[in-house]
């Protein structure tokens, strides 16, 4: 069953400041969707939030994908 997942910037701050931020996120999303066993059916990347339509046959996979997402975002912003 597909899940609609939303990720917002902290206090609705900007998530994507430049075109390369969007590309980085999409590259990361593909890599970690493959690693966690998730299928991304659709996505919308807005300036301050993201919508994902995700499914997986593994119960904890979408949660693991989002957990890795937060970790990746913090590392990317620190660099």
Image (tube, rainbow, N blue to C red):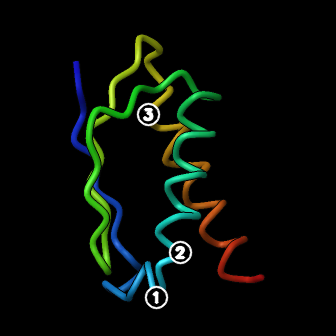
Q: Residue furthest right?
A: 79
Distance of label 1 from label 2 (alpha carbons):
7 Å
The residue that disc 3 covers is 62
Which residue is located at x 33 percent, y 24 percent?
55
For label 1, the SS is loop
Q: Is 74 left, or right, of 4 in this rendering?
A: right
Point out residue 73 in the picture as x, y percentages from the top left corner.
Answer: 60, 68
Which residue is located at x 33 percent, y 70 percent?
8
The residue that disc 1 covers is 17
Q: Are marks 2 and 3 in contact (CB under 8 Å)?
A: no
Q: Residue furthest top?
A: 57
Which residue is located at x 77 percent, y 82 percent?
79
Q: Quadrant of residue 69?
A: bottom right
Q: Quadrant of residue 72?
A: bottom right
- On screen, 22 above or below 56? below
Q: Quadrant of residue 59?
A: top left
Which residue is located at x 49 percent, y 54 percent?
26
Q: Which mark is residue 21?
A: 2
Q: Are marks 1 and 2 in contact (CB under 8 Å)?
A: yes
In the image shown, does 19 or 7 lie closer to the viewer? 19
Front tag of 1 and 3: 1
| Residue neighbourhood size for the residue with mark 3, other residues' Cα within 10 Å, grouped as few (<14), some (14–19), many (≥20) | many
For label 3, the SS is helix
Distance of label 2 from label 3 (alpha carbons):
22 Å
């Amino acid at each position: 069953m597909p899940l609609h997942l939303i990720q917002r910037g902290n206090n609705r701050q900007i998530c994507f400041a430049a075109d390369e931020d969007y590309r980085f996120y999409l590259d990361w999303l593909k890599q970690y969707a493959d690693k966690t066993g998730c299928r991304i059916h659709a996505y919308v990347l807005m300036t301050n939030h993201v919508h994902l339509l995700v499914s997986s046959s593994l119960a904890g996979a979408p949660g693991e994908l989002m957990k890795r997402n937060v970790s990746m975002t913090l590392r990317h912003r620190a660099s």
